[in-house]
Image (cartoon, grey):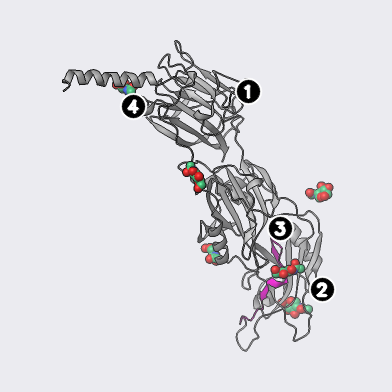
Amino acid sequence: MFSPSQLLVFAGLAVSLAECALVAPANKGVPATISDPADFNGTTTDTSAIASTAQQVDQKSGAPTDVAPNQPVADTTVTAVDGDLVNATVASTSRRSLTGAASHLSRRNNSNYELVFWGTGTGPNDRDASIEGTAYLTYTVVSNATYDIDDCLAKCDSVDGCVFANLYYEFNNPGLDHQFSEGSNLKCALYADIHNATEKTNFGGQQLYPAPGGLTYIQQSSGWAAKSLVDPATPSGYDLVFGPTNGANNAPGYMGFAFLDKYDVDACATLCNQRGADPVGGACQYFNIWRAVVNGVPTTYTCSMYYIVADESTAVNYGQGSLVVTESRGYKRQNIVVDGGFEGYTCDDEGDDVPFCFTASYANWQGTSPAGGTFDASIFNYQPYAHTGSAVALLGSAFDFDSLPGTLAPTQSLATHSGASYTLQFFHSSFYSGQVDEANATLAVIWNGQTIDTLHPGFAQWTPHQYTVTAKGNDQLQFTGGNAPAYVFVDDVSLYPL
Ligand SMILES: *[C@@H]1O[C@H](CO)[C@@H](O)[C@H](O)[C@H]1NC(C)=O
Ligand SMILES: *[C@@H]1O[C@H](CO)[C@@H](O)[C@H](O)[C@H]1NC(C)=O
Ligand SMILES: *[C@@H]1O[C@H](CO)[C@@H](O)[C@H](O)[C@H]1NC(C)=O
Ligand SMILES: *[C@@H]1O[C@H](CO)[C@@H](O)[C@H](O)[C@H]1NC(C)=O
Ligand SMILES: *[C@@H]1O[C@H](CO)[C@@H](O)[C@H](O)[C@H]1NC(C)=O
Ligand SMILES: *[C@@H]1O[C@H](CO)[C@@H](O)[C@H](O)[C@H]1NC(C)=O
């Protein structure tokens, strides 16, 4: 039997063995607790939910019979979110600076149209139908003294995003005949997508005059499409990654999707900016917008959002069943922080399988120690320590020489716009020394000298953190913390314009 005092001796030995076992990061130590590998299984695009929702949504419309011509184009509407049908307009935060910019599928700059389909004649018994299709914008009426195609196409030219016009007579509509000041029944309906004769489904048949007045009917319904389509302007705060192609992304880090009533890249950017952060992957960093064509007819405009930046290599979903993917483009969020993943710091010796090196500073980041401290903030190129890639920043004495907090900051001030709002995001972990020794890990986030948050995470795996900050221009960002052996790692620092 051991006496109680012998037990204490053994317990003390166990503790000191554990302490000895922990090798400092500067000595290429193995963390006491291994970082959980990021598990992105099950986070790829849910293409079947998108396809089945596309079969349910109805975004087709045409010029109404009871509304005066020349109404302003309505804001882009969200018609589905993550598989649920909804009806909500997109708050247009990212569109404030885009007056006059082409934000839609395309826009030509001259009257350069081609006939898609011609209407049936004007005889008393001829009947035709107008288009009911996606991306309806507005309608006007043009003089019915002649069949005034030019005037209708000129109107399309003047409406942002218009690429298609449906010109037709609508009879027995008292609004057109008497009420609206234009005094014409030759309607010119404008769309932000191209439609064809298979979509001529509105045959009228409404009783708008009191009986025995006739029912409404349509004649000479022709369709005109822009000959050349131009790329939409890239939304502010984003860069085009690929497109247009006929493949949608099937990629990890998927956050969900929304359907839009128009191909509106700015609306999709706004949805990405406003999407709540994923608890593991963080903020939306990338979106993929594409047009779903079902049975040959444009049906909806998908906006898929991701917390991992994708590219054309995963844009391999060409459709399923009757659904075909077209006009697919990927856009990635701009990061104001230069080299926020520290990957600009690389090792000289290329002999090792897994490179290992560290420094107190390099071109893009500066680590500083308080008086009496040694390597209290440093940058490592060593893949086992990193969140993504192979480089990462460490707070806390890299040699375990002292327990003073270090400070990490970009070497250059941030290229921000005064008064603009940004999302600051970074990933932090404090697992290196294990549960007990990481208990006192702290990390302060400092923006222009003001501490905006102090984290006391204790032991923690990689976790994203987000803050909304307002810039004053040339802003200063700092991270202070770590008190060895309560080490703190910081990786993937980003500042996204809102
Ligand atoms: C992801 O799935 C693959 C195949 O099912 C599996 O081999 C791998 O271990 C999984 N990764 C994680 C981190 O769970
Ligand atoms: C969506 O809401 C608007 C405004 O409330 C309404 O005018 C419109 O008819 C609705 N659309 C659908 C498809 O429900
Ligand atoms: C229209 O396009 C032509 C050539 O494609 C170009 O030279 C001209 O600047 C454009 N005009 C406008 C207003 O964008
Ligand atoms: C033109 O439209 C007006 C208003 O609907 C209608 O009264 C008139 O008969 C139309 N003229 C022709 C030639 O169709
Ligand atoms: C119109 O749409 C139908 C239905 O998909 C398609 O078969 C046809 O080729 C299209 N016509 C033209 C001229 O594009
Ligand atoms: C954490 O901080 C408290 C208060 O300063 C201290 O008593 C404790 O020993 C610290 N724990 C570790 C593991 O350093």
**Quadrant position of residue 333:** top right
The residue where tag 3 is placed is 159
Which element carries disc 2, helix, strand or loop? Answer: loop
**Could you tell me the amino acid type at mark 1?**
Glu
- In the picture, the disc for residue 350 is 1
Depth check: give the residue in front, 83 or 350.
350
- Vertical comparison of 419 with 150: above or below: above
Which element carries disc 4, helix, strand or loop? Answer: helix
**Could you tell me the amino acid type at mark 4?**
Val
**Quadrant position of residue 228:** bottom right
In whole angstroms, how far apart are the C-alphas of marks 3 and 4? 65 Å
- In the picture, the disc for residue 146 is 2
Asked if marks 1 and 3 touch (Cβ < 8 Å), the reply is: no
In whole angstroms, how far apart are the C-alphas of marks 2 and 4? 86 Å
Where ligand 5 lies, by image quadrant?
Answer: bottom right
**Quadrant position of residue 482:** top left
- Vertical comparison of 318 with 55: above or below: above
Q: Specify the farthest residue to the bottom.
A: 212
- Vertical comparison of 358 with 372: above or below: below
Which element carries disc 3, helix, strand or loop? Answer: loop
Depth check: give the residue in front, 398 or 160.
398
**Could you tell me the amino acid type at mark 2?**
Thr
